[in-house]
Amino acid sequence: MNWIDEGIFLNARNYGESASFVTILTRAHGRHAGLVRGGSSRRLRPILQTGNFVQCAWRGRLEENLGTFTIELSHAIAAALLDNPVALAGLSSACGLVSVLLPEREAHSTVFHSLRKLLDTIKRDNNWFTEYVRWETNLLRELGFGLALDSCAATGQTDNLTWVSPKTGRAVSADAGAPYADHLLPLPKFLIIQNSASTGEIRDGLKLTGHFLGRAAESGGCALPPARNRLLDSFSRTPTTSCDNNVL
Protein backbone atom coordinates (compact mmCIF):
# COMPACT_ATOMS: atom_id res chain seq x y z
CA MET A 1 0.00 0.00 0.00
CA ASN A 2 1.49 3.37 -0.95
CA TRP A 3 0.53 6.88 -2.00
CA ILE A 4 2.10 10.26 -2.84
CA ASP A 5 0.65 13.57 -1.66
CA GLU A 6 1.47 17.18 -0.83
CA GLY A 7 1.50 18.12 2.82
CA ILE A 8 2.18 20.59 5.60
CA PHE A 9 4.65 19.28 8.15
CA LEU A 10 3.14 19.41 11.65
CA ASN A 11 5.58 17.85 14.12
CA ALA A 12 8.30 15.30 14.72
CA ARG A 13 9.81 13.45 17.65
CA ASN A 14 12.75 11.12 17.91
CA TYR A 15 12.09 7.43 17.44
CA GLY A 16 14.88 5.00 18.24
CA GLU A 17 18.46 5.94 17.44
CA SER A 18 18.02 7.85 14.20
CA ALA A 19 14.39 7.70 13.01
CA SER A 20 11.64 10.28 13.58
CA PHE A 21 7.94 9.78 14.26
CA VAL A 22 6.27 12.52 12.22
CA THR A 23 2.80 13.91 11.57
CA ILE A 24 1.83 15.64 8.33
CA LEU A 25 -1.42 17.27 7.21
CA THR A 26 -1.83 15.99 3.66
CA ARG A 27 -4.19 17.36 1.04
CA ALA A 28 -5.94 14.07 0.16
CA HIS A 29 -5.19 11.79 3.13
CA GLY A 30 -5.73 14.12 6.08
CA ARG A 31 -3.61 14.19 9.21
CA HIS A 32 -1.28 11.24 8.81
CA ALA A 33 1.54 9.87 10.96
CA GLY A 34 4.48 7.71 9.99
CA LEU A 35 8.18 7.04 10.47
CA VAL A 36 11.00 8.79 8.65
CA ARG A 37 14.17 6.74 8.64
CA GLY A 38 17.18 8.91 9.35
CA GLY A 39 14.91 11.75 10.38
CA SER A 40 17.41 13.05 12.94
CA SER A 41 20.17 13.34 10.34
CA ARG A 42 21.74 16.66 9.40
CA ARG A 43 20.23 16.41 5.93
CA LEU A 44 16.63 15.85 7.04
CA ARG A 45 16.40 17.98 10.19
CA PRO A 46 15.90 21.26 8.26
CA ILE A 47 13.10 19.63 6.25
CA LEU A 48 11.25 18.16 9.23
CA GLN A 49 10.28 21.54 10.67
CA THR A 50 6.77 22.58 11.70
CA GLY A 51 4.99 24.52 8.97
CA ASN A 52 7.16 23.50 6.02
CA PHE A 53 5.40 22.57 2.78
CA VAL A 54 6.50 19.12 1.65
CA GLN A 55 5.98 16.37 -0.89
CA CYS A 56 5.58 13.03 0.85
CA ALA A 57 5.36 9.39 -0.16
CA TRP A 58 3.85 6.96 2.36
CA ARG A 59 4.35 3.22 2.25
CA GLY A 60 2.90 0.51 4.47
CA ARG A 61 2.20 -3.19 4.15
CA LEU A 62 -1.44 -2.55 5.06
CA GLU A 63 -3.45 0.67 5.06
CA GLU A 64 -3.85 0.54 8.85
CA ASN A 65 -0.10 0.18 9.45
CA LEU A 66 1.96 3.09 10.79
CA GLY A 67 4.08 2.99 7.65
CA THR A 68 7.06 5.07 6.58
CA PHE A 69 7.38 8.44 4.88
CA THR A 70 9.84 9.67 2.31
CA ILE A 71 9.77 13.47 2.39
CA GLU A 72 11.05 16.23 0.12
CA LEU A 73 10.91 19.94 0.86
CA SER A 74 8.64 22.02 -1.39
CA HIS A 75 8.77 25.37 0.39
CA ALA A 76 10.50 26.33 3.64
CA ILE A 77 8.38 28.36 6.04
CA ALA A 78 9.81 27.86 9.54
CA ALA A 79 13.36 29.05 8.77
CA ALA A 80 12.07 32.40 7.51
CA LEU A 81 10.40 33.13 10.87
CA LEU A 82 13.25 32.37 13.25
CA ASP A 83 13.84 36.08 13.91
CA ASN A 84 10.13 36.81 14.43
CA PRO A 85 8.97 35.10 17.64
CA VAL A 86 5.34 36.23 17.38
CA ALA A 87 5.03 34.96 13.80
CA LEU A 88 6.69 31.72 14.86
CA ALA A 89 4.15 31.46 17.70
CA GLY A 90 1.33 31.88 15.16
CA LEU A 91 2.74 29.15 12.95
CA SER A 92 3.26 26.79 15.89
CA SER A 93 -0.22 27.46 17.25
CA ALA A 94 -2.00 26.81 13.94
CA CYS A 95 -0.08 23.60 13.28
CA GLY A 96 -0.54 22.50 16.89
CA LEU A 97 -4.31 22.99 16.70
CA VAL A 98 -4.52 20.88 13.54
CA SER A 99 -2.37 18.19 15.18
CA VAL A 100 -4.68 18.00 18.18
CA LEU A 101 -8.15 18.65 16.78
CA LEU A 102 -8.34 17.01 13.35
CA PRO A 103 -9.16 13.28 13.26
CA GLU A 104 -6.40 11.11 11.88
CA ARG A 105 -6.50 9.86 8.28
CA GLU A 106 -9.64 11.80 7.40
CA ALA A 107 -9.36 14.20 4.46
CA HIS A 108 -10.03 17.86 5.27
CA SER A 109 -9.01 19.64 2.09
CA THR A 110 -10.58 22.92 3.23
CA VAL A 111 -8.41 22.95 6.34
CA PHE A 112 -5.36 21.97 4.31
CA HIS A 113 -5.75 24.81 1.82
CA SER A 114 -6.69 27.39 4.45
CA LEU A 115 -3.71 26.44 6.64
CA ARG A 116 -1.38 26.64 3.67
CA LYS A 117 -2.70 30.11 2.84
CA LEU A 118 -2.41 31.22 6.48
CA LEU A 119 1.19 30.05 6.84
CA ASP A 120 2.15 31.78 3.61
CA THR A 121 0.50 34.97 4.89
CA ILE A 122 2.37 34.74 8.21
CA LYS A 123 5.63 34.38 6.31
CA ARG A 124 5.21 37.34 3.95
CA ASP A 125 2.86 39.78 5.70
CA ASN A 126 3.43 41.52 9.03
CA ASN A 127 -0.33 42.12 9.34
CA TRP A 128 -1.40 38.48 9.67
CA PHE A 129 -3.10 38.77 13.06
CA THR A 130 -6.71 39.22 11.99
CA GLU A 131 -6.31 36.53 9.33
CA TYR A 132 -5.14 34.14 12.01
CA VAL A 133 -8.22 34.68 14.19
CA ARG A 134 -10.50 34.34 11.17
CA TRP A 135 -8.70 31.10 10.33
CA GLU A 136 -9.53 29.78 13.80
CA THR A 137 -13.21 30.62 13.28
CA ASN A 138 -13.13 28.64 10.03
CA LEU A 139 -11.43 25.73 11.79
CA LEU A 140 -14.21 25.76 14.38
CA ARG A 141 -16.77 25.54 11.60
CA GLU A 142 -14.99 22.52 10.12
CA LEU A 143 -15.01 20.87 13.54
CA GLY A 144 -18.74 21.43 14.04
CA PHE A 145 -18.33 24.29 16.52
CA GLY A 146 -19.07 27.18 14.16
CA LEU A 147 -19.89 30.63 15.53
CA ALA A 148 -23.06 32.48 14.45
CA LEU A 149 -22.04 36.12 14.30
CA ASP A 150 -24.51 37.57 11.79
CA SER A 151 -27.43 38.41 14.08
CA CYS A 152 -28.35 38.77 17.74
CA ALA A 153 -29.46 35.55 19.42
CA ALA A 154 -31.99 37.45 21.56
CA THR A 155 -33.49 40.01 19.16
CA GLY A 156 -32.47 38.97 15.66
CA GLN A 157 -31.03 42.41 14.90
CA THR A 158 -27.94 42.53 12.71
CA ASP A 159 -26.29 45.73 13.92
CA ASN A 160 -24.44 46.76 17.08
CA LEU A 161 -23.33 43.19 17.79
CA THR A 162 -20.78 43.35 20.61
CA TRP A 163 -20.91 40.05 22.49
CA VAL A 164 -20.95 36.29 21.98
CA SER A 165 -22.67 33.77 24.22
CA PRO A 166 -20.06 31.34 25.60
CA LYS A 167 -22.73 28.64 25.66
CA THR A 168 -24.17 28.88 22.15
CA GLY A 169 -21.52 30.72 20.12
CA ARG A 170 -24.18 33.17 18.91
CA ALA A 171 -23.76 36.94 18.73
CA VAL A 172 -25.58 39.25 21.15
CA SER A 173 -26.29 42.96 20.61
CA ALA A 174 -25.04 45.63 22.99
CA ASP A 175 -28.49 46.38 24.42
CA ALA A 176 -29.58 42.77 24.81
CA GLY A 177 -26.29 41.75 26.36
CA ALA A 178 -25.80 44.69 28.72
CA PRO A 179 -27.43 42.99 31.76
CA TYR A 180 -25.25 39.90 31.23
CA ALA A 181 -22.01 41.53 30.10
CA ASP A 182 -19.95 39.85 32.82
CA HIS A 183 -20.96 36.45 31.46
CA LEU A 184 -20.44 37.13 27.74
CA LEU A 185 -17.39 37.14 25.48
CA PRO A 186 -16.44 40.36 23.63
CA LEU A 187 -16.99 40.23 19.86
CA PRO A 188 -14.25 42.18 18.02
CA LYS A 189 -15.57 44.09 15.02
CA PHE A 190 -12.98 42.69 12.62
CA LEU A 191 -14.82 39.35 12.78
CA ILE A 192 -17.94 41.05 11.41
CA ILE A 193 -16.46 43.46 8.88
CA GLN A 194 -13.12 43.41 7.09
CA ASN A 195 -11.06 46.05 8.88
CA SER A 196 -7.88 46.48 10.89
CA ALA A 197 -7.78 45.77 14.61
CA SER A 198 -6.01 46.92 17.74
CA THR A 199 -3.91 44.53 19.76
CA GLY A 200 -6.69 44.45 22.35
CA GLU A 201 -9.21 43.40 19.71
CA ILE A 202 -6.86 40.66 18.49
CA ARG A 203 -6.55 39.50 22.08
CA ASP A 204 -10.34 39.45 22.45
CA GLY A 205 -10.61 37.48 19.21
CA LEU A 206 -8.11 34.90 20.43
CA LYS A 207 -9.96 34.57 23.74
CA LEU A 208 -13.24 34.12 21.88
CA THR A 209 -12.02 31.41 19.52
CA GLY A 210 -9.90 29.88 22.27
CA HIS A 211 -12.99 29.31 24.40
CA PHE A 212 -14.67 27.24 21.70
CA LEU A 213 -11.45 25.55 20.56
CA GLY A 214 -11.05 24.43 24.16
CA ARG A 215 -14.55 22.99 24.05
CA ALA A 216 -13.72 21.14 20.83
CA ALA A 217 -10.54 19.77 22.39
CA GLU A 218 -12.41 18.68 25.51
CA SER A 219 -14.98 16.83 23.41
CA GLY A 220 -12.11 14.84 21.90
CA GLY A 221 -10.55 14.09 25.26
CA CYS A 222 -7.53 16.34 24.79
CA ALA A 223 -6.24 19.81 25.63
CA LEU A 224 -5.24 22.76 23.49
CA PRO A 225 -1.56 22.70 22.50
CA PRO A 226 0.82 24.81 24.62
CA ALA A 227 1.71 26.81 21.50
CA ARG A 228 -1.84 28.21 21.43
CA ASN A 229 -1.47 29.48 24.99
CA ARG A 230 1.90 31.03 24.15
CA LEU A 231 0.36 32.91 21.23
CA LEU A 232 -2.32 34.41 23.47
CA ASP A 233 0.32 35.29 26.06
CA SER A 234 2.34 37.17 23.43
CA PHE A 235 -0.64 39.46 22.80
CA SER A 236 -1.48 39.75 26.50
CA ARG A 237 1.98 41.24 27.11
CA THR A 238 1.56 43.81 24.32
CA PRO A 239 0.03 47.29 24.86
CA THR A 240 -3.28 47.99 23.14
CA THR A 241 -2.16 49.60 19.88
CA SER A 242 -3.02 49.34 16.21
CA CYS A 243 -2.05 46.15 14.41
CA ASP A 244 -1.85 47.89 11.03
CA ASN A 245 1.93 47.69 11.26
CA ASN A 246 4.39 45.23 12.72
CA VAL A 247 3.92 46.41 16.27
CA LEU A 248 4.66 43.09 17.95
Image: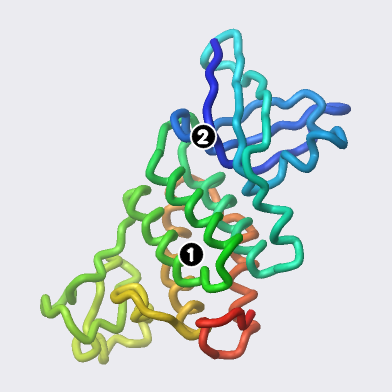
Lower position in the chain sequence, tag 1 or tag 2: 2
Dot 1 surroundings within 10 Å: few (below 14), some, or many (20 or more)? many
Q: Residue 187: which quarter of the image?
A: bottom left
Q: Nearer the viewer, residue 246 or 31?
A: 246
Count the numbered circles shown: 2
Residue 17 higher or lower than 222, as above or below: above
The residue labelled by disc 1 is 132
Check the picture and name the quadrant holding the C terminus: bottom right
Question: Amino acid under label 2?
Answer: Thr
Residue drawn at x 63%, y 66% is: 87
Distance in Å between CA atoms under marks 1 and 2: 20 Å
Residue 136 vs residue 245: left or right?
left
Residue drawn at x 44%, y 45% is: 113
Determine the secondary structure under disc 1. helix
Residue 84 vs residue 178: left or right?
right
Residue 76, image x, y percentages: 67, 47
Q: Nearer the viewer, residue 135 or 167?
A: 135
Residue 219, image x, y percentages: 43, 49
Dot 2 surroundings within 10 Å: few (below 14), some, or many (20 or more)? many
Task: Point out which mark residue 106 bears.
Answer: none
Residue 117, image x, y percentages: 48, 53
Check the picture and name the quadrant holding the N terminus: top right
Residue 30, image x, y percentages: 47, 34
Task: Point out which mark residue 26 bears.
Answer: 2
Residue drawn at x 34%, y 81% is: 189
Question: Amino acid under label 1?
Answer: Tyr
